[in-house]
Image: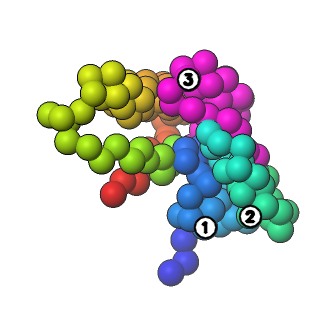
Amino acid sequence: MNLTFSGKTALLVGGSCELGLALAPLLSNQGICPVIACRRPESMERAKQAMAGCSGPHRTVFLDLAQPQSLDLVFSSLENGMDYLVDFAQEDYESLVASADHDTVKDYMGTCVSARSLMLKKAARIMMPQKRGRLVLVSS
């Protein structure tokens, strides 16, 4: 399959996953800067290693949806706008909500629902004045 992309910047949230690391070089080789957002140092290192052979634009940034200030920092660093937001980030909360600790459920919902909706709102506010952009949410 031959994929083609247009634009300048793609924010890959949870971009150190296998799918993110497969997409990032494709974007970079077509001149689109993948901004690979990771929340762990080892994930950032894996992303940097995966992109080492790419001559096109790319960068890695810290993003933890549980830390709203990191969301603000990432979005303020997108000075050239954003053409794609691809969300690969997943949480692994596997417990039944009925038997779960209240604080655990509250933290999960805050990060996975509230913070994610704030992220999408920020992305949409960047894309709307541009009159272009794509939000791609990848989930199991």
Q: Quadrant of the C terminus?
A: bottom left
On the picture, is 1 further left or further right than 98?
A: right
Residue topped by disc 3: 67
**Residue plotted at (48% across, 46% down):** 89
Q: CA distance from mark 2 to mark 1?
A: 9 Å
Label 3 packing within 10 angstroms: few (<14), some (14-19), many (20+)? few
Amino acid type shown at disc 1: Ala
Amino acid type shown at disc 2: Ala
Label 1 packing within 10 angstroms: few (<14), some (14-19), many (20+)? some
Badge 3 element: loop
| Foreground of the two, 127 or 140 | 140
Q: Earlier in the sequence, mark 1 or mark 3?
A: 1
Let me know if residue 89 is in the magenta part.
no
Which region of the structure is painted magenta? Answer: 59-83
Vertical arrangement, residue 62 with respect to residue 33, above or below: above
Residue topped by disc 2: 50
**Residue plotted at (50% across, 81% down):** 1
Label number found at residue 22: 1
Residue 78 position, x and y percent, is 68, 32
